[in-house]
Image: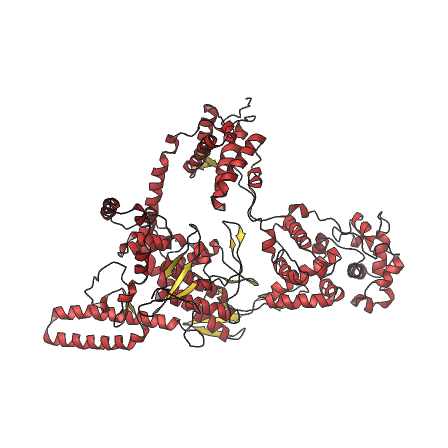
Amino acid sequence: MTQTEVPIDQPRRRTARPALPYKQHDHLAPITPAAGGARDRLAIDTVLELLPTSTWARRHKGTADVGPRRILSWLDTYPGSGWQDRWVTSGADNDLAWIDTLISADDPRIPSSQHSQLMDGVARLLRGRIVFPSYGFLTSYNPATLYPRARAAFRPDLFERFDSRAGQLAGTRRQHNCALVVASKLVLHTGRDLDELTPEHLLAYRAWHFSVFRKSPSGLDLAWSVLAEVADFEEYATLADAVRLGQRTTTELVDAYDVKHRTVREVLIRYLDERRAGLDYNTFLHIIWALVGVFWADIEHHHPGLDTLNLPAEVVDAWKQRLRTVTTNDGGSRPRRERTRILITVRSFYRDLQQWAADDPAWAAWSFPNPIRKNDTAGFIKAKAKTTAAMHQRVRERLPHLPILVDTAERLKTEQAALLAATNAAAVGQTFEHAGRQYRRRALKSLDRRGAYQLLEPPTRIEDLTTGEQIDVGKKEHESFWGWAVIETLRHTGIRVEELLEITHLALVSYRVPATGELVPMLQIVPSKTNEERLLLVSPELANVLAIIITRLRTENGGTIPLTARYDKHERVIGSPLPHLFQHRHGWSWAIPVDRTIQKWLNQILQRTGLRDAAGAPLRCTPHDFRRMFATEAVSGGLPIHIVAKLLGHKTIDTTQAYTAIFDDELVRSYRSYLDARRTLRPEEEYREPSDEEWRDFEQHFEQRKLELGTCGRPYGTPCKHEHACIRCPSLRVDPRARDRIVDIIANLRARIDEARANGWTGEVEGLKVSLNAAAAKLVSLDKMRGRDRDTSGGITELGIPVIISATP
């Protein structure tokens, strides 16, 4: 073994992660000039006879062809097989700097008139398809009338179809116009009609635009969706589908780290292929990053020439030392948070090779002593306990503020909806008053290509006449509504954010209780992290939230819920088009929000609450915090922890216990001691998850919870703590049909309080006041829910969910 060691104090390169999950198509960026067309070799006089007319040509009939003739004569002085070659070799395709060089001093007209005539000549040559401009030239040219006239010249029937479809999809006229400009540029540059364009033409334009402006061109995604129908893009219906990499092969992922030694590379690929079948894609990527990127690529960088996995002690020690820190973007360093996990990954790699060598001799050549000792990973349990403690502290800090957050979200949603309604009722430019403040509805304008102002739709922007603030009411209402919907759904279900975004209208089902015939709504949670489906009972509050979401989606989409495909960023796959409940209008299309959008909506509502953490900083809450708060509230309320584990989709109660911040340690020890004693009598499998009979009992426990005013919602397996004084109990879920009964109870309680005061029954007065306050609170809550569960027509919103009838008699 020979090796050249790199000094340990040499700055270590930052470990590269695998390439981004989308394609840049950089190889298409240096676009090859288009080949000459059918008119490429015609004589100048013949070309002039074929050129289309223009406004300039009609106004100056005597000198109409002076501009194009002068340009062609100038191009003819350059070498090339045709006009397109001369156009490129002359440099005319780069920009318009050459135009002024063609202004003649012998021409009696002023230079500005000659310049206008030459510019008209360029436009006529492009429309006549004598030359085909590059995208850089079109950007420099910035023509005012070229694109509309090109659309009128090159298969106007196809452009009419394109225009109609883009108008149906686009949310605003600006998006519509941008798509038309993209289509016009593609036709002018390629010399093809719309129905002859291919995905490669659009990807080449995108790659060029990225290379120059570092972003995708406006309108390209809409143009792609329309051209996918006009030109029949069979493979990809959207631009997003075309640029996503999807799941890459193990070889591609390993080669992203440029492993030098071929034999070690092959061993790594073979090992990772063996592991891949049992892992989700995101976990697989992390293992590759840790094993190939952080471990072996770093070893190769600091010890070039090393060709074996049997590493010398000094090499391993040096690597462990470097592993403690990570280089930051500014050249500094910080402690590496994932150090222990990386060590465990490398240790598992060596252990797997040793075990596999016992069964398969092919691995024996790579079975070496494990360089990662058990003591190296001893800090994992301590780090895990520290993480759990920090997680518990987050829950303890946020759970008391949950009512404030919920109320703020509800109030903000209501306020923004009312302001949007007032804005829509006012004419553009009109001043109106709302909630004691004066506003003026403003028209959002933008300059079009000709320098004229055009109105952008919809104009939901207003000006606060007191502060001068410009407010996009439509955007504010949109964000406040979906922020409220996210908070309500997460706090009532405890699901993960991935599962939230996977909820579809098809996931809502009704279960008919055999004994009573009652229909109970249930929510099917599709596999996310554990690949196990589960059903959640839908509370009246959650049913109300889902009904409002369904109504909104139907209203905004002509009476139906849009079918949208969700891209799973963890698995790098695109799902089938489904009626997802958490989707919104994004630009011109329907889209499922990404995680950062969900977090943005939450942050905006949190900012309005004014809440702060223990350090005095603004309180921050993630979607996963609601999952932990749900678990904590459920366990604290008396629900058995193994039932909570089932609701959350956890395989063991240990995971669930880590989620619950408020939990009696003595109760945990007693419960486990009880289980240990029972395991001597019953099989161990019984205590890993609830039995079918127990789970059915949990689902149907509400059969015995029917009350005069509604349903008792106390946790499963817990006694009544209020001695059946239901009007005081927070677990009472009031039936809307019992409202009149509550009004009668409130009146009766007030009369009894007056009687008690008159007779001097002080103790009775205090007890009756508690009941009165509880009854009044329930009436307010009931009216609030009744007020928001009706659609715009005033009728009750139907969830439209199927019914599951139990086969059990």
- Left/right placement of residue 133 relative to residue 216 reads right
Number of numbered tags placed on the structure image:
0
Give residue 765's quadrant in the image. bottom left
The residue sitting at 18% across, 77% down in the picture is 751
Colour option used: secondary structure
Q: Using the rendered image of the protein, determine whether residue 668 is visible from the camera's viewpoint.
A: yes
Q: Using the rendered image of the protein, determine whether residue 331 is visible from the camera's viewpoint.
A: no
The residue sitting at 32% across, 44% down in the picture is 389
Q: Nearer the viewer, residue 576 or 797?
A: 576
Please state, as top left, top right, bottom left or bottom right, where the N terminus lies in the image.
top right
Q: Residue furthest top?
A: 2
Q: Nearer the viewer, residue 275 or 602?
A: 275
- Residue 272 in picture, x, y percent from top left: 51, 38
- Residue 405 in picture, x, y percent from top left: 36, 60
- Residue 549 in picture, x, y percent from top left: 44, 66
- Residue 419 in picture, x, y percent from top left: 45, 70
- On screen, residue 37 above or below 269: below
Please state, as top left, top right, bottom left or bottom right, where the C terminus lies in the image.
bottom left
- Left/right placement of residue 134 relative to residue 436 reads right
- On screen, residue 615 above or below 143: above
- Left/right placement of residue 460 relative to residue 28 reads left
The residue sitting at 43% across, 67% down in the picture is 802
